[in-house]
Image (cartoon, rainbow, N blue to C red):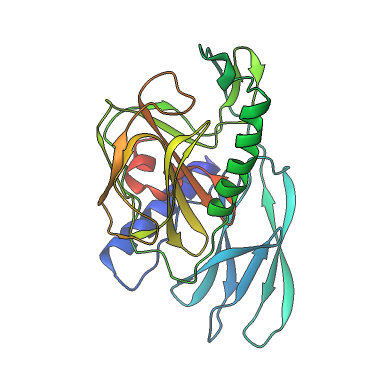
Amino acid sequence: MIRSSLYAFALLMLSFTAAGAAEPLLPAADPVPGGIVLVSLGDAAARPEARYRGNRVMVQRRGAEWVAVVGVPLGAKPGEHRLQIRSPGNQQKALAFRVEPKEYAAQHLTIKNRRKVNPNAEDMKRIRGETKEIRAALAAWSEADPSPGGFLKPVDGPYSSPFGLRRFLNEQPRNPHSGVDIAAPEGAPIRAPAAGTVIGVGDYFFNGQTVFVDHGQGLVSMFCHLSRTDVRPGQQLARGEVLGAVGMTGRVTGPHLHWGVSLNDARVNPKLFMATELAEQ
């Protein structure tokens, strides 16, 4: 009931965002691992700076107050967490917020290519280099504010794997699913869910052909397993602009898009930025 109320409040805020160009993007609040917490910072003449676990945090204006939009990592423990705030006058303080427990479902997948489950030594050398590159892209920060309005669904199709699943590949435990999978035919166009800048294009062992888009203020989208990429680093994308096509490159069981969203370097549920998707839950 509490979470439903939070969703309803956030839907109202997103609707207001769409109607008033001056209002910023504010996602739905869901204070769980892999969720988002909205922390009021009060009023100030200029935007305060917020940090969580050492990472810069998005701060947006909401009416007469500033709001910190905090991404909570999937591995965060329930309980009290702290946000470090520095005001324009260089005054510093800590604000506490709570993370509630959440148990995600489990998923068991069978991968025919065993190297995609247990890579060999040569594969691991490649993976270590790619991991640094991917982590750097997901931790990107730019001062630009995200464009107003909720995210678009980047490709048409049903969700085939939800966010946060505890995954078992060939019965071996792996990291939880840090995005959503959308089933779609190979070659289906993938569109930018919001305006942004392409900050990376690569072809990786697990993720296949991948595009990273920086939406501003620590909000980054990652699109994986593409059959082709239609963009280049540094390119500016409008909301809804095609960036590539669905494929089955990397570690996959069939054609689909894996869409991940990073906020202050925490992987969060992309649906929290999508008013229409939340309304259907």
Measuring from the top left, give residue 241's x and y in whole percent.
25, 52
Name the image quarter holding the C terminus: top left
Measuring from the top left, give residue 84's x and y in whole percent.
71, 68
Residues 131 and 120: in front is 120
Residues 57 and 60: in front is 57
Q: Quadrant of residue 239?
A: bottom left
Measuring from the top left, give residue 147's x and y in whole percent.
35, 64
Q: Is residue 218 above or below residue 177?
A: below
Q: Is residue 214 above or below residue 281?
A: below
Residue 228 placement, left or right of 181: left
Q: Residue at x 29, y 37 (%)?
A: 245
Measuring from the top left, give residue 116's x and y in whole percent.
56, 21
Residue 157 placement, left or right of 29: left
Q: Residue at x 38, y 26 (%)?
A: 248
Q: Is residue 103 above or below residue 81?
A: above
Q: Quadrant of residue 196?
A: bottom left
Q: Residue at x 44, y 58 (%)?
A: 214
Q: Residue at the front extreme?
A: 122
Res. 33 visible in picture: no
Q: Is residue 134 above or below residue 180?
A: below
Q: How many numbered circles are shown?
A: 0
